[in-house]
Amino acid sequence: MYKIVSKEVLAPKITRFSIEAPEVAKSRKPGQFVVIRADETSERVPLTIVDSDPKKGTIDLIIQDAGFSTHCLTCCEEGDGFLDVLGPLGRPTDMHKYGTVVCVGGGVGTAVLYPIAKGLKEAGNTVVTINGARNKELLILEEELAKVSDELIIATDDGSYGVKGFGSTILQGMIDDKKKIDFVVAIGPTMMMKAVAEVTRPYDIETIVSLNAIMIDGTGMCGGCRVTVGDEVKFACVDGPEFDAHLVDFEEQIAKHHYYDEEQACQMDKIITDAEQERA
Amino acid sequence: MAEEKRTRSPRKKPDRIPRQEMPVRSAQDRIQDFEEVALGFDAVLAQKEAQRCLQCPKQPCVDGCPVSVDITGFIHLITEGDFIGAARKIKETNLLPAVCGRVCPQEEQCEQVCVVGKIDEPVAIGRLERFVADYERNQGTVVLPEVAPPSGKKVAIIGSGPAGITVSYELLQAGHKVTIFEALHELGGVLIYGIPEFRLPKKIVAAEIDTIKKLGAEIKLNMLIGKTRTIDQLMNDDGFDAVFIGTGSGLPMFLKLPGENLNGISSANEFLTRVNLMKAYREEYATPVKVGKKVAVFGAGNVAMDAARSAKRVGGDDTEVSIVYRRARDQMPAREEEIHHAEEEGIIFNLLTNPIRFIGDENNHVKEIECVKMELGEPDDSGRRRPITIKGSEHLVEADTVIVALGTMPRKFIAETSPDIKTSDWGTFLVDEESGETSKKGVFAGGDIVTGSATVIQAMGAGRVAAKAIKEYLAEN
């Protein structure tokens, strides 16, 4: 059992957990993830490690309630535990000094972006971060990102906070203003990552994205996380999760994300029915 | 006849007992669920079958067994009615008789060289092994083997599949401390995630592996060596005196054809892991598994049969499942018994057929496979006749679910973090055949990580070889 040391609701349906996992805390690097299983009947869910404290032996995860399994995870409380935590998995982010890097985060993807931005800052880069969300309420990690960024731009789709607009549009604005950009990291909804890839492609700015693929074991065994990258088929779990944004087939990834929609809907219906029965 | 004690007279012809059939559930009945297909011998059948053994002094069957089970010895005990004694006799060299009795290809090993088999059908050694193992377990009389006094040495076992379990068992008996590192959340490796419940009930795997825990092995689940810790950390920081690597061959191979990433196409590893490890076929488990109305399974080994038969069970009566294979029936690598069971369960064999590309619908979901027909040409390096494409035979096969069972390759976590362990171009570990020792001192390996995809019993055989070498190594270092 991996004990939940603390739980904090960051935004509606977005929860931060600190979990006792000393071995993972010791060995993880930015960009890596864990696979967790809440209890015996749960799915194995891949989640990026947001932060770690090797001394306390804890890792931090940010979980968005976006379906049956993540819903069940966010229902766990401080003092409870997760049955299984496996990691760190995936390849760490290639951290070196690029010069000026722009980190574009969208929604809960910001949770994945944060450790990378932090690492890039520590590697001596000038870090410009665009922290995007649908609205003010859903924005996360503003304070943390401010600490590791030389410049932080807040963007909301509805303009309720910061600049109104998408991360990709803001990035295009920077390029139009002739701002020198050496490297871009984009993490968020697949559509948003695709948009950023299209913005930087004509200028040949090296751009990476972190894919949130469907996987079971996370150790290269199932191949459920296949992704077409250029002419090759890669496994997000062992070859990624980060890939060259200009080579990823995003349409394929979007289709894959919808593969289990029906099953998800069924399971969510069951939760609602169970809850109603309990009330009745 | 049944009470008559057999003598060594193979020429006794007229009243020879025929090989006893093992009761099996009817196909119609068993495809409704995941319960075991074969029901096993009862005591009467077992004793009758045991009497067929000639008790040959040369024991070719023992040489045919990768773990050298004293086959004539345990069969003799069955004839005497000492089933528990027979089970213990097997366990002197094989911790997993209930597993091996079910999944070993006996027809290529002990039973292939059985002397009775030269004039009649061989003694059903596998079925007898299964019977006594089940008997002992069901009687609750499983006893632990004697253990030597503590040696003060400790060994790290990486991977808890058949190889790792075998090494652990042998080292524990020799008094060494053993810590097993398993990446998944359950022990057993391929016995748990790969082989389906209807062929190998997980309760039985757990019961046999339990002995390892009772003998004091320390179990560390969710530990991926090469990621969570490295071999060097285990040896330098954690104080392990030796390491055994039995991480198997886990990376699934694909066909590398256009459209293979469409939705609805998965590896057999993914499909079987969802069903077996994650128990997706049970309603209370959250992991989904999808099977449509037309399933095509590529490959013709045991894994392909497991995937096809599992798909039939998940999909239900109106799901049509085909094995699509580019060679002919007698070249299929699966065990005859598995092919036979699949045929009985209504699996269609679409042979001499090879895919060219996968075609998707508007939702990026597979709907058809373009295939060509093949014919057999001259034998290739493997001795099997080479399949050759028949020109102009392109045709479409309807499929909404595709499972690719082409075999697996080793994963690289350890090779990448321990460059001093030499590997082949395929990623398999290069070891000394006599000892299983790798190019890194004190590090041994065995099973699929050395041979590429092979059988449970071959991995166990490699485990025994390595265990012996590790014991010698520990005595000297």
Image (tube, coloured by chain):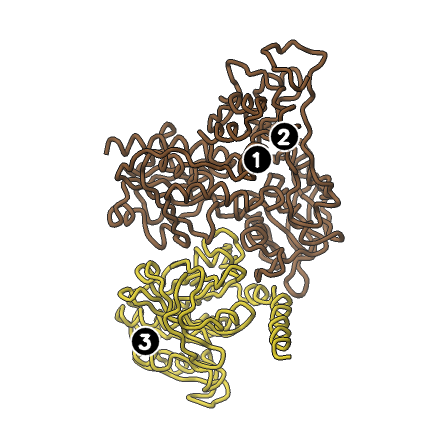
Q: Residues within 10 Å of mark 2 (few under 14, many from 20)?
A: some
**Number of callouts:** 3
Which residue is located at x 48 percent, y 81 percent?
A12
Name the residue nearer the viewer: A180 or B233: B233
Identify whether B308 is placed above or below A193.
above
Q: Which amino acid does label 2 sit on?
A: Ala
Secondary structure under tag 3 reads: strand
Identify whether A99 is placed above or below A137.
above
Whether pointer 1 and pointer 2 mark residues with C-beta atoms closer than 8 Å, the reply is: yes
Secondary structure under tag 1 reads: helix
Which numbered dot is residue B43?
2
Which residue is located at x 37 percent, y 50 percent?
B225
**Colour in which the image shows chain B:** brown
Q: Mark 1 lies on which chain?
A: B
* Residue indicated by mark 1: B135
Q: Mark 3 lies on which chain?
A: A
Q: Residue B172's spot in the image, x, y percent?
A: 36, 38
Q: Which chain carries label 2?
A: B
Q: Which chain is yellow?
A: A
* Residue indicated by mark 3: A127
Q: Distance between the residues labelled 1 and 2?
A: 9 Å
